């Protein structure tokens, strides 16, 4: 068994969609980035890659490669799952926390869990997604950005 941790952060900017866990969340700003900037899915991918000692998403999906411009992070997560599977790893579970003052994410959590589970090839009961504010502290608390942490457990097949 192997444990991985992932972290990602993106700035909130006008003129972009807010995509979290593959869900288009209605909001006046979105996350800035080369891909869809899905901070939640990026943290999950980094946790999985880290657990398998396969580097990080920047190694596999570099932000200077036009192939990944506007990329759907849920599709990239499918590719990460394939990388793990090719190396005989199975995802046991995922646990993630989104750090976000606004918008409120409760209505979208179940869809995020389902999207991540589907891409990871596991049952949604093995995926936890939580959201928390930071009581108006720091860049997430003042609405400048959104961050996410994820941990995972993988095992050899």
Image (tube, rainbow, N blue to C red):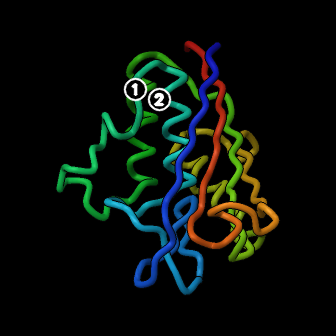
Q: Tell me the quadrant of the picture where the C terminus can be found.
A: top right
Image coordinates for residue 93, horizontal then vertical, percent: 68, 33
Q: In the displayed structure, would residue 107 be above or below residue 65?
A: below
Residues packed near mark 1 inside 10 Å, few (<14), some (14 to 19) or many (20 plus): some
Q: In the image, 26: left or right of 74?
A: right
Q: For numbered disc 1, what is the local secondary structure?
A: loop
Q: What count of labels does the image hold?
A: 2
Q: Quadrant of residue 70?
A: bottom left
In the image, 13 versus 89, the foreground residue is 13
| Residue at (41% x, 67% y) in the render | 32
CB within 8 Å, label 1 to label 2: yes
Image coordinates for residue 94, horizontal then vertical, percent: 67, 38
Image coordinates for residue 79, horizontal then vertical, percent: 37, 40
| Residue at (27% x, 44% y) in the render | 62
Distance, label 1 to label 2, CA atoms, is 6 Å
Residues packed near mark 2 inside 10 Å, few (<14), some (14 to 19) or many (20 plus): many
The mark lying in front, picked from 1 and 2, is 1
| Residue at (40% x, 32% y) in the render | 82
Q: In the image, 70: left or right of 154?
A: left
Q: In the image, 3: left or right of 37?
A: right
Residue bearing the label numbered 1: 55
Among numbered discs 1 and 2, the one appearing first in the sequence:
2
The residue lying furthest to the right in this view is 135
Residue bearing the label numbered 2: 49
Q: For numbered disc 2, what is the local secondary structure?
A: helix
Image coordinates for residue 111, horizontal then vertical, percent: 65, 64
């Amino acid at each position: 068994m192997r444990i991985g941790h992932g972290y990602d952060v993106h700035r909130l900017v006008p003129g972009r969609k807010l995509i979290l866990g593959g869900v288009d969340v209605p909001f006046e700003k979105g996350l800035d980035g080369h891909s869809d900037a899905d901070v939640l899915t990026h943290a999950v991918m980094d946790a999985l890659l880290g657990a398998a000692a396969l580097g990080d998403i920047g190694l596999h999906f570099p932000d200077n490669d036009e192939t990944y411009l506007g990329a759907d992070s849920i599709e990239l997560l499918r590719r990460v799952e394939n990388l793990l599977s090719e190396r005989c790893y199975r995802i046991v579970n995922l646990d993630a926390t989104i750090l976000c003052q606004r918008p409120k994410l409760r209505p979208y959590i179940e869809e995020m869990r389902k999207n991540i589970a589907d891409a990871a090839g596991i049952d949604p009961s093995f995926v936890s997604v939580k959201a928390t504010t930071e009581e108006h502290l720091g860049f997430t608390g003042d609405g400048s950005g959104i961050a996410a942490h994820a941990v995972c457990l993988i095992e050899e097949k």
